[in-house]
Amino acid sequence: MNTIFFNDKTFTTDDFILKGIEKGDYENCVFKNCDLSGADLSGFRFSESEFTGCNLSMAKLLNTAIQDTRFTGCKMLGLHFEGCNGFGLNFLFTNCNLNQSSFYKMKIKKTVFNNSQLQETDFAECDLTAAIFDNCDLTGAIFDNTIIEKADLRTSFNYSINPETNRIKKAKFSLPGITGLLDKYDIEIDQSV
């Protein structure tokens, strides 16, 4: 089957209501308010594209290529990014809900998560070198054998990262966030002093 190419196109929810999304190669495309929840995006390629206000929750991402693609204001619950094609993998998330998603064992250096919900998201064995977590809620996020060297978590909150089981050299944390590095010791930290 030949691959269908889409270049410089804008899609809205209406485009997918009757026939769904066509499997293909989407380059420099814009997706606005599209409901792709549960869609099988396996084998698709999204390059230099943008998703705004879309619902991609529980979409299948087996061998999906995501290259230089931005997600803004998207609902992305339960996505398994580790199934993506790793070649040229590069994305940016702003105002997204990525709760219960998984980046297990992925190499996503310098990835930016801006003002996003990352509750119970799996970053185990992930390489997050120099990643930026700007104002993100990391309640219950899993960091285990994770590389977060040079990562910036200064404005993020509710994380629990064990320095003994993660590589955190030169990572940046705020003073109030330090409690997330010490909570495994079950000690009380009084920040009023």
Image: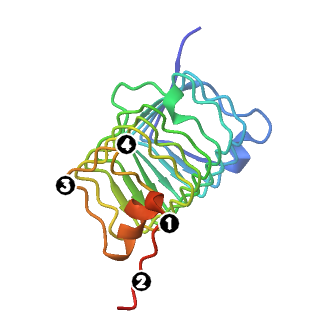
Instruction: Name the mark nearer the viewer: 2 or 3.
Output: 2
Residue toward you, 132 or 90: 132
Label 1: few (<14), some or many (≥20) within 10 Å? some
Whether residue 25 is visible here, answered yes or no, is no
Mark 3 or mark 1, which is nearer the start of the sequence? 1
Disc 4 and disc 3 in contact, CB within 8 angstroms: no
Label 4, label 2: how far apart the Cα atoms are: 25 Å
Q: Earlier in the sequence, mark 1 or mark 2?
A: 1
Residue holding disc 4: 165
Dots 4, 1 in contact, CB < 8 A: no
Q: Nearer the viewer, mark 4 or mark 1?
A: 4
Q: CA distance from mark 1 to mark 3?
A: 20 Å
Which badge, 2 or 3, comes first in the chain's sequence? 3
Tell me the CA gap for discs 4 and 1. Answer: 18 Å
Using a 10 Å C-alpha cutoff, classify the residue at mark 2 as few (fewer than 14 neighbours), some (14 to 19) or many (20 or more).
few
Per the image, the residue denoted by label 3 is 170
**Extreme residue in the bottom direction:** 193
Give the mark nearer the N terminus: 4 vs 2: 4
Image position of 173 with respect to 171: above or below: below
Tell me if 64 is positioned left or right of 149 in this view. right
Give the amino acid type for the residue marked by disc 2 in the picture.
Answer: Asp
Q: Position of residue 80 (x, y in %)?
A: 57, 35
User: Which residue of the protein is positioned furthest toward the left in this rendering?
Assistant: 170
Given the image, on which type of amino acid does mark 1 rest?
Asn
Per the image, the residue denoted by label 2 is: 190
Picture coordinates of residue 151, whole percent (x, y): 28, 54
Quadrant of the drawing holding the N terminus: top right
**Residue 54 visible in the displayed image:** yes
* Amino acid at circle 3: Lys
Which residue has dot 1 on it? 158
Residue shown at the point (27%, 50%) measured from the top left = 168
Badge 2 marks a residue whose secondary structure is: loop
